[in-house]
Amino acid sequence: MRKITWILLALLLMLLCSAVMAEEESDITYNEMYNTPTVAPTATPEGYTPTPEPPPATPVPTATPRYEADGSVVITLTAVGDVTIGRNAQHKGSSIFEKELARQDDDINFIFRNVKDILAEDDVTIINFEGVLAEEYSIPSKKRENSYLFIGEPSYAEALVNGSVEIATIENNHIDDFGDAGRKDTQETLTANGITWADEYNMASYETQGVKIAVLSYKTFDYYDTLHNKVPREVAAAKETHDLVIVCYHWGDELDYYPNSRQQKLAHVTIDAGADLIIGHHSHRINPIEEYNGKYIVYSVGNFSFAGNNKPSDMSTFIFQTRFRMKDGEIMGNSFRIIPCRISSKTDYNDFAPTPYTEQLRIDNVINTMVKNGKYIDNAVTEYPLDWE
C-alpha cells in the first residue's frame, strides 16, 4: 500500500511539472494578442494638422539623384507588415522571441538576414513597428488586466538599421502598452538610431534623390467617421510640402483575407484627398491590392517578423515594392511588384526571420489567394508581377 501511495505521488508531481512547462511554452494566438483595445485612442483636436517629428541626431539620408534620360528620377519604395519583436511583459520566464534570439547567438540581426539585400537595394523601406522599445517600464493601471504587453530592448533597433529600414510607422494597438512613457521611449530610440517614424500626431518626412516623401500613420478600429474628416485635411497639408504622400493604416478585421466596406470607403476618401499610396496591416493576413484612380491601395501586407506566435496557421506574407517615376515634383508613372515570402526561415515553426519563397507552388498560392479575394473589392488588380516591367 505504501509503495502504491509513493507511485501516485510521483505521478502527480510529474503532471504538475508538465502543466507548468506547458504554460511557459504556450503560444500567443492572434485573437488573444490582437483583440480590440479597451481604451479609445486619444481624440484629436478639431483642425489638427500633423507636425514633422523632431530631427534625428544625424541628418536623414538623401541619396544623390540618379537622373533618367528624360530628366526624371525613379524612387523604389518597399513596404512590409507588422514587425513585433521582444517579449510579453505579462509572461513569466523566457519568451519565444528570447529563446530564438539565444539560439541565434544573441545576434539581433538574424531577423532581417534573408531580406536585407532586397531592402538595401531600394530608396526607402517602410515597416509597421508594433510594440515598445524601452529599458524600463511601468504598466498603466488601465493596462494591467491585458494579457499581452510587448516590449523589446532598445538595442533591438540595431536590426532595423542593419536591415536597411528607413521609416517605421508606430500608430497601432501596442504602441501604448506602457503608456505615454513607452511611446516616448520608442520614439526616442528610433530617432537615436536614425529611423524616421510616424504616429497619429507626427508626420514622417524623408527625402531621397531630391524627392520629399511624407508618411502618415493611423489606427482605425471604431474611429472611421473621425478619420474621414481628419485624414483628408492632413493629407492635403502634407501634399503642400511633399512630392509623395504615403498613408499607412492599422485597420481591418483579424484573420480576414479581404478588406471590409469601411476600409474601402476610407481608402477612397484618402486617395481622393491626394494620397499617392496606401499601405495597410493588422489583419495578420495578406489582402488583395486595389488600383483606384491610378493609385495603389495595399489593404494588408500581413505579418513580417512576428514574435507573437511560434506556430501560426498561415505564415505567408509578401514584400510590396513600387517605383514612382518623378519629374519636377510630379508622378510620371508608377508600377509595382510583390515578393511572396514566409514569415519564417523554417517550415515547421516561426523563427521570426522572413524569407522569400523559392517553391513555385508557394509563390502561386500567395498570388492566387490575392486574386481570389479581389472579388470583394471593385477595382482589384488582376495580375501580381514578380519582377519589374
Image: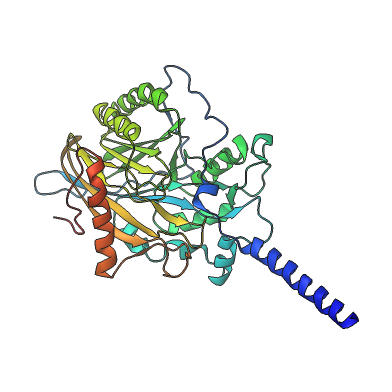
Q: Nearer the viewer, residue 172 or 322?
A: 172
Q: Is residue 154 left or right of residue 15?
A: left
Q: Is residue 7 left or right of residue 42?
A: right
Q: Is residue 25 left or right of residue 299?
A: right
Q: In the current view of this chain or complex, which residue is farthest to the top?
A: 46
Q: Is residue 75 above or below residue 264?
A: below
Counting from the top left corner in percent of width and height, residue 104 is at 53, 70
Q: In the current view of this chain or complex, which residue is farthest to the left?
A: 70
Counting from the top left corner in percent of width and height, residue 115 is at 36, 62
Q: Quadrant of residue 299?
A: top left
In this rendering, the count of numbered labels is: 0
User: Which quadrant does the C terminus fall into?
Assistant: bottom left
Q: Nearer the viewer, residue 318 or 198?
A: 318
Counting from the top left corner in percent of width and height, residue 168 is at 43, 45
- Residue at (20%, 37%) from the top-left corner? 378
Q: Quadrant of residue 281?
A: top left
- Residue at (54%, 29%) from the top-left corner? 40
Counting from the top left corner in percent of width and height, residue 53 is at 45, 34
Figure colour scheme = rainbow
- Residue at (34%, 22%) from the top-left corner? 233
Q: Quadrant of residue 273?
A: top left
Q: In the current view of this chain or complex, which residue is farthest to the bottom?
A: 3
Q: Nearer the viewer, residue 60 or 20?
A: 20
Q: Is residue 238 left or right of residue 368?
A: right
- Residue at (54%, 46%) from the top-left corner? 189
